[in-house]
Image: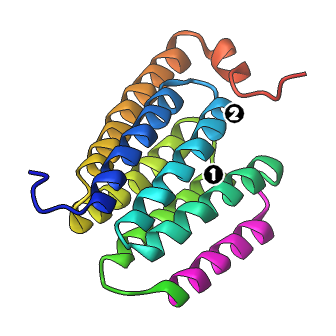
């Protein structure tokens, strides 16, 4: 499976497995804040992985995810900031565009941006699942086995957490309502 891969591509596979660990721990959490912090670490690894594979649009958009997470935590629900982030993503994609596969990275960036700025809880996780599917398709097309596995695990872990949150909302509505309140 790995025959014929360069050392750079093998390094990309290894780095993507590190990202996998951060993603699983993050999406297994019921707390939105913890998820966001772990996604920052995962996206550093993903950006490095994409760079090692020469997928520059995906690498740059992964780095922009880090800024998006920080801004979304601070400016939750702010349409103007969200639109500015979307515009920066589109400019970055236009400057780094190489092939049609880059559409998947752009789709992931769009879904992720809307989800993180405008949604919380289950709705946010559904939108982030759509972003993960876009990233998974991108990884498949560039040949990243580790990245594909990482995003597949993100989707599965995310849906398990969505199920857990839905069950909590139904059984313990008061606790669910307090789950993502800001900590004092």
Q: Nearer the viewer, residue 48 or 77?
A: 48
Mark on residue 174?
none
Q: Is residue 78 above or below residue 166?
A: below
Q: Which residue is mark 1?
A: 116
Q: Which mark is residue 33?
A: 2
Q: Is 49 left or right of 110, judged from the image as shown?
A: left
Most common SS among magenta residues: helix
Residue at 34% of width from left, 67% of height from top?
A: 53
Residue furthest toward the top?
Answer: 171
Judge from the rendering whether residue 131 lies leftward or rightward of residue 8; answer left or right.
right
Rendering coords of residue 25 (x, y %): 49, 27
Q: Residues within 10 Å of mark 2 (few under 14, many from 20)?
A: some
Task: Say whether residue 124 is magenta.
Answer: no
Which mark lies nearer to you, 1 or 2? 2
Q: Residue at x 60, y 59 (%)?
A: 65
Relative to 137, does residue 156 appear above or below in the rendering?
A: above
């Amino acid at each position: 499976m790995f025959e014929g891969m360069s050392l750079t591509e093998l390094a990309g596979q290894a780095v993507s497995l590190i990202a996998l660990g951060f993603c699983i721990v993050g999406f297994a959490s019921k707390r939105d804040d913890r998820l966001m912090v772990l996604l920052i670490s995962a996206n550093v690894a993903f950006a490095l992985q994409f760079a090692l594979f020469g997928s520059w649009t995906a690498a740059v958009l992964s780095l922009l995810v880090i800024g998006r997470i920080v801004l979304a935590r601070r400016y939750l629900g702010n349409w103007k900031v969200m639109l500015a982030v979307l515009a920066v993503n589109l400019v970055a994609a236009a400057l780094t565009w190489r092939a049609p596969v880059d559409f998947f990275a752009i789709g992931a960036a769009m879904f992720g941006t809307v989800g993180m700025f405008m949604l919380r809880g289950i709705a946010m996780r559904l939108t982030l699942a759509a972003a993960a599917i876009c990233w998974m398709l991108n990884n498949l097309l560039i040949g990243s086995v580790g990245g594909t596995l990482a995003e597949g695990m993100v989707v599965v872990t995310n849906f398990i957490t969505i199920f857990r949150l839905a069950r909590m909302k139904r059984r313990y509505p008061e606790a669910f309502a307090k789950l993502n309140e800001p900590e004092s």
